[in-house]
Image: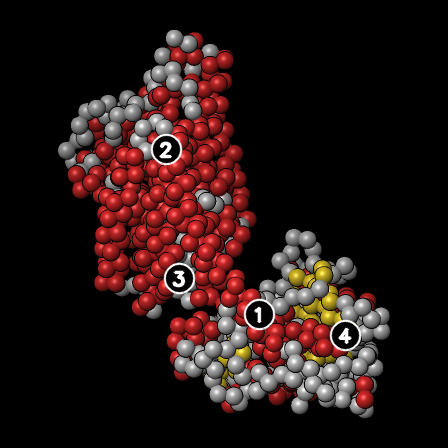
Amino acid sequence: MSPAVRAQRPIPAPSTSYLPEVQGLRTVAVVLVAIFHIWIGRVSGGVDVFLLISAYLLTRSLTASATAGNAPKPLQFILRKFARLLPLAAATILLTLVAGWLIMPASQHATLTGDALASLGYFENIRLQQLQADYYAHDLGGASLFQHFWSLSIQGQVFIIWPLLHLLGYAIAHRSGRRLPRVLGLIFGIVFIASFAWSVLHTIDNQPHAYFDTFARMWEFALGSLVALVANRLQLSAGMRNLMSWLGLLGVVLCGIVLPVESSFPGFAALWPTLSAVLIIVAAEARNDEPPARFSAERLLATGPLRWLGQYTYALYLVHWPLLLLAVQLTKNTEPNFMFGTGVLAVAFGFSFVLTELIEKPVSRVGKPRNPARHLAVIAIAAIMVAAPALIHTQQRLANNASSQAQLENEFATATSTPTPAETEDAYDGPDFAPLDVQVGAQNPDAPANPSPVPDDPDAAQTYAGEGTDCTDHAPNPGDDAICWELASGNTKAPTAFFVGNSHTQQLAPVGYQTAAITGYLNVRVQAGPSCTFTWQPGLQAADVCDRVWLDASDYIADKQPELVVVLGTKSAPDGTEETWEHFPTWLKQMRKTSPDTKFVVVRDNPRFEVSPYECALVNGFDSPDCQHPANKPVSKTYIKQIEDAGALWVDFTDYYCPDGTCRPEVGGVVTWFDASHITTAFSRTLTQRFADEIHDHVPWWPDQVFAE
């Protein structure tokens, strides 16, 4: 026997005996997750509990094996673990993916496929971090079918890291002669302290990002491992165990009820459910094979029904969330009542039973022998089962995208023999060009509804505008969530059109890009930040990204004095009202003083809606009245006059967005909006001549005929 093993004898190894209370606790945790997702829309704490339990069971098993002289074999453990977990997860992912393709709007298919592959690869939490998803936002209509895979992804990552830490602990104990539980306790104690400190700080700084952060969650796993290392050494009276188990169970159940939604999970607040689980586990370990007391929470958790349901909890967690969202999509019921939720939960239990009996149990029997090759084969088959159809669907979608883009380009590719602007009497002094013959979109707003508008592919339609290269001066700070692009014509005499503001301004910039493409004689600069409507006021300091956008833009105008500045003059709201800004006319006057030769064009914001007209049309048809909305009310004439008195031109495209006062998901055969507020790049391009018509008298050098009459 090795010295390491002899040294460990004074400290008992973690027991591997079955604890029915832990199985019951896991059942309660997962059922709470489902209930809170369906009816309450608050954090239940159940996820935190089963993360802790998974590490507790893992460390309990590996440490007991190692103290018996069996060195940890991380690769073998990892293959065996994922061979057991992945088939059921892959089957659920595939079923969810196919159902999503059939039921969810086509505009969501690309994101759906990306989420499926991220879930299959156990990095969905990282993907959600990148997307800055908010797990607390109870918007069932807009959530991902795979959003709940964030916790399984973190768990999968830990299942790779933890065996390596156990091997490290075993190696240190073996070489130093120190007791293995103490070495592992030191390792997991360090992980706990470092991770918990990061969790608290990161939650304060960026809560949605912290929620999905692996290291911010690692302390919960470390706590479970620490419990596994010390719980069997505690001696507790029956009365103390009874008290601890009841306090723990009440803590787990009441956590999501008592703590408000805005509580700072996963920082300090996550101690509530995890410590509650610790009380139950410690009480169970301290029984030392004694039966649970008659009226204890241990006895309740160890009851047959909870233990029987426990074997289906993994499948229940996998299926309940996509079933809920698919049901919401089919019924349009975004606030489930009791009957609706009960139906979803019943169907979820049915699927859990079938998937467990037909997939998880048979596959686990196949992979039970310690055969790494067999485990690897099971993992490969499960991965291919999802990856193959996902990649085929993606290839087809990209082909449709390319076809749709080509179809759209054809609408802008027919030159006419109309005389060039160089032959007309205006101030345009660029090279000759031939206007395009465009008869779609804003060029033909009175056309009847087209059931198959362009772009006919969701990916092509849902594209933000952006051309050129990153700005080199007066540009956003590297860490700012803002954009600045410059498209140079190559002609040193070409004027510059500067579009500044928010993403709606960005979506208006294609009128500049299209003019530049036709004439070859225009530089276009776009500087914008998400939701960065006008924030300037006298004495403004750069307090946030939007302030910096407007300060940088103001400095650029004063420094470079572009020939044209295009800004939005209002911010629309879904209720048809529009926000105006007290200091906006003052800013215009100040900018005109610093750059007297610059022309300013102020454009009214496009309408916004509660629901995306485009996604509505994908479900109900582009001619459906359900997808149409009344145009916004007129903007105050007093406000418009203030803008005009400041020397700027007011432009309103509402008649083209919403012909005859009705906003439609398509106009002139072109998709108008790609979500609830942004016009498509394609439709914006069709506004090019309308923009020229509006501004030519105010900006004489702008070509008056870019599209043929």
Say what amino acid the circle numbered 2 marks.
Arg
| Label 1 sits on residue | 405
* Image location of residue 686, percent across then percent down: 61, 80
Q: Earlier in the sequence, mark 3 or mark 4?
A: 3
> Mark 4 falls on what kind of element?
loop
Q: Earlier in the sequence, mark 4 or mark 1?
A: 1
How far apart, in angstroms, are the residues tagged by discs 3 and 2?
A: 32 Å
| Label 4 sits on residue | 520
Residue count near mark 4 (Cα–Cα under 10 Å), binned few <14, some 14–19, many ≥20: some
Q: Earlier in the sequence, mark 2 or mark 1?
A: 2
Residue count near mark 3 (Cα–Cα under 10 Å), binned few <14, some 14–19, many ≥20: some
Taking 421 as reference, is 681 above or below it? above
Say what amino acid the circle numbered 4 marks.
Gly
| Label 2 sits on residue | 374
Residue 183 in the figure: left or right of residue 480: left
Residue 440: which quarter of the image?
Answer: bottom right
Q: What residue do we see at 20% from left, 40% from top? A: 308
* Image location of residue 622, percent across then percent down: 44, 79
Residue 200 in the figure: left or right of residue 325: right
Labels 4, 1: front one: 1
